[in-house]
Amino acid sequence: MSAKIIDGKAISANVKEQVKAEVERDKLDIGLAVVIVGDDPASRVYVNNKKKACEFCGIKSYEYALPAETSEEQLLELVDTLNADKKVNGILVQLPLPDHINEKKIIERISRDKDVDAFHESNVGRIMIGNFAFLPCTPAGCMELIHSTGIDVSGKNCVVIGRSNIVGKPMAMLLLHENGTVTICHSKTKNLAEVCAAADILVAAVGRANFVTADMVKEGAVVIDVGINRLENGKLCGDVKFDEVSEKAGYITPVPGGVGPMTIAMLMRNTVTAWRIQNEK
Ligand code: GUN
């Protein structure tokens, strides 16, 4: 059997169309500040894509591109300024930050009502108890892709590989909120292949090219590939060995064109939510 490809590009375009229509309908004047420190090429690509999405949706974007030598104190000052700026409804500080800056300190300084990444510990806590304003963009995008298959998460065996704060942990929580039976795997997991092979829904967020092979996948499973790995030949590749896994899975996301564009679409949705939180209290 050959898997159906989940078209993240088309689904994300749909989400952005919805956001654009909402912004136009309600004549919303929304601003997103995007902060990038240093010149990491991957971060530059992400930030450019975020700006393009804003333009499409009718959201104003304000870019702050700071040199790599920017001090923690200077970045904290910028966050304070953006927190107080009425034109700015969402604040996104692109990660990773240079080593001399404490990421946690910066994230915690962002007003929780402008934290469109949902990285602030207050927003993380709210995801845990199911009372959230913002969903973290990448896991929320994965959930949209899973929903697009028409498969109900309730009662399914869900396995998430990876336990990062940005993807693995919140992903597990969102699956749990929909009554999935969730296992989180990581580098210390025993019998990883066996655990993964029992999954009806498998989410790979490992950060290692071609990590998930066909023997780790159940026949007909939904496979969501969060990985974006650059190979030596310059090509992008996911965490899943696409050629062989797509012969066995029921549904699979490609890389590129799967989870990546969804993350940005969900950021647009969160930015509208931020505006509503700030203006419709
Ligand atoms: N770096 C990699 N992914 C992300 C993301 O979703 N948000 C931010 N701010 N930085 C990232």
Image (tube, grey):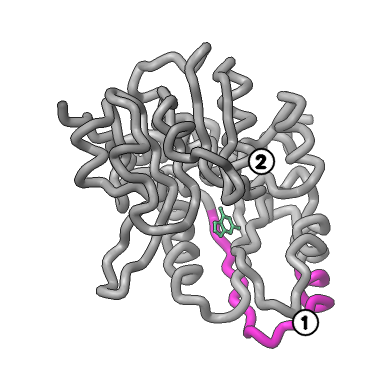
Image position, residue 153 (x, y; %): 48, 18
The residue to which callout 1 is attached is: 71
Disc 1 residue type?
Ser
Magenta stretch bounds: 60-78
Q: Quadrant of the C terminus?
A: top right
- Any mark on residue 58, and which? none
Residue 15 versus residue 104: which sits nearer the camera? Answer: 104
Please report the residue visible at 28 percent of the width from the left and 72 percent of the height from the top. 234
In the rendered image, residue 61 lying in the magenta stretch gets the answer yes
Image position, residue 270 (x, y; %): 59, 40
Residue 179 versus residue 144: which sits nearer the camera? Answer: 179
Q: Residue extending furthest left? A: 1
Residue 27 versus residue 77: which sits nearer the camera? Answer: 77
Please report the residue visible at 81 percent of the width from the left and 55 percent of the height from the top. 108
Please report the residue visible at 56 percent of the width from the left and 46 percent of the height from the top. 162
Image position, residue 131 (x, y; %): 74, 25
Q: Residue extending furthest front? A: 191
Q: Counting other residues with Cα less than 10 Å from the Cα at mark 1, is it few (<14), some (14-19), or many (20 or more)?
A: some
Q: Quadrant of residue 278?
A: top right
